[in-house]
Image (cartoon, rainbow, N blue to C red):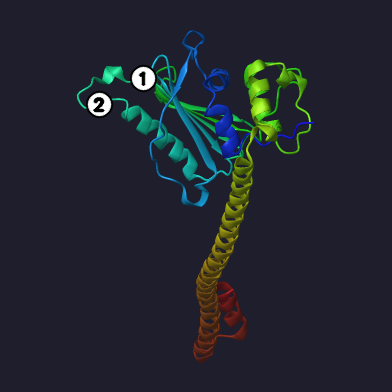
């Protein structure tokens, strides 16, 4: 029984899609939103340009770059661990490929489309169940007006679920291959084996297809992924704790300020109330004294007090 390696790793991904243009063509035609009359017919690999790395995940990004018979550029990236900067990296990579098509003095009309396809083994969008994200520029008021020269497609493999177990669309089968095949796989599904291109990819994913040196590199890759994941999770924990303590101190300070303000307001109100009470008491005694001096009878004094002091 064959033992499979995970096609999401760098060495397996590049053996399948970085050295076999017919497999990459099948993969791209299945996953990209290409019009029926603009399917990829042939591919040629291009040398990847140096682009800024993400320091925390420099070993967990795998990319393959190629162009087709129309001159369109395709950049395929595999990312194990999601970080916010990855989306900017994909956009930067696609934009740089678009700009570098022209030499100085050449006409802009010569520019061809660039597609960036990013396969994510880790979710980047937690607010919905969508797993296929297609980006391109569009007019805000009229979404039918678009600029299609640079398009990005992000696929979240964790969220991907076939519509039905019998769904035999090529896009679904390729994504099943990327999602289901790993070291725990003991036997590939017959539906995957039935597609010649995917059957070939399965053969290239078998451990027997790799030299001892390549297997060492494979293990080192996953060790690096594990280490970097631990580092980023540790950083997140530290950041959370620091943020919590900072928020707590700010909350306490705000609480003290709010308490002081409330105390002052209540003190003022209480002082005013006490002042009014004391004022009424002193004024009442003074009135009684003046009325008695004037010879007013006690009954009349009570009538005056009830009218003006209660």
- Residue 259 lies, in percent from the top left, at 55, 71
Instruction: Please indicate, yes or no, whether residue 4 appears anywhere in the rendered image.
Output: yes
User: Considering the numbered disc 2 on the image, is that residue within a helix, a strand or a loop?
Assistant: loop
Secondary structure type for disc 1: loop
Disc 1 residue crowd, few under 14, some 14–19, many 20+, Cα 10 Å: some
Q: Residue at x 51, y 52 (%)?
A: 56
Residue furthest front in the image: 212
Mark earlier in primary sequence (2, 1)? 2
* Residue 309, picture quadrant: bottom right
With 185 as the anchor, is 113 left or right in this view?
left
Q: Residue at x 55, y 60 (%)?
A: 239
Reply above or below: 52 against 208.
below
Compare residues 131 and 21 and report the one nearer the observer. 21
Residue, disc 2: 103
Estimate the x, y position of residue 83 in percent, counting from the top left: 53, 45
- Residue 74 visible in the current orientation: no
Q: Which mark is residue 112?
A: 1
Q: Nearer the viewer, residue 210 or 264?
A: 210
Label 2 neighbourhood size at 10 Å, few (<14), some (14-19), many (20+)? few
Q: Nearer the viewer, residue 89 or 76?
A: 76
């Amino acid at each position: 029984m064959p033992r499979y390696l995970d096609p999401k790793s760098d060495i397996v991904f590049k053996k399948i899609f970085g050295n076999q243009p017919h497999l990459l063509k099948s993969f791209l035609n299945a996953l990209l939103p290409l019009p029926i009359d603009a399917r990829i017919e042939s591919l040629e690999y291009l040398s990847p340009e140096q682009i800024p790395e993400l320091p925390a995940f420099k070993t967990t990004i795998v990319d393959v770059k190629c162009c087709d018979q129309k001159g369109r550029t395709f950049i395929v990236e595999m990312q194990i661990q999601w970080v916010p900067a990855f989306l900017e990296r994909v956009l930067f990579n696609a934009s740089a490929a678009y700009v570098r098509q022209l030499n100085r003095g050449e006409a802009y009309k010569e520019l061809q489309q660039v597609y960036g396809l990013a396969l994510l083994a880790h979710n980047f969008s937690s607010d919905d169940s969508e797993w296929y994200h297609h980006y391109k520029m569009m007019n805000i008021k009229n979404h039918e007006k678009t600029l299609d020269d640079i398009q990005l497609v992000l696929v979240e493999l964790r969220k991907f679920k076939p519509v039905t177990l019998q769904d035999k669309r090529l896009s679904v089968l390729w994504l099943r291959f990327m999602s289901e095949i790993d070291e725990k796989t003991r036997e590939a599904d017959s539906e995957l084996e039935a597609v010649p291109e995917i059957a070939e990819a399965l053969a290239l994913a078998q451990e027997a297809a790799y030299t001892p040196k390549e297997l060492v590199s494979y293990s080192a890759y996953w060790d690096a992924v594990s280490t970097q994941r631990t580092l980023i999770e540790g950083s997140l924990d530290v950041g959370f704790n620091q943020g919590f303590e900072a928020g707590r101190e700010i909350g306490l300070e705000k609480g003290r300020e709010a308490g002081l303000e409330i105390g002052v307001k209540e003190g003022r109100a209480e002082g005013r109330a006490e002042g009014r009470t004391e004022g009424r008491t002193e004024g009442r005694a003074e009135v009684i004294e003046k009325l008695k001096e004037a010879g007013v009878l006690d009954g009349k004094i009570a009538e005056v007090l009830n009218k003006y002091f209660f």
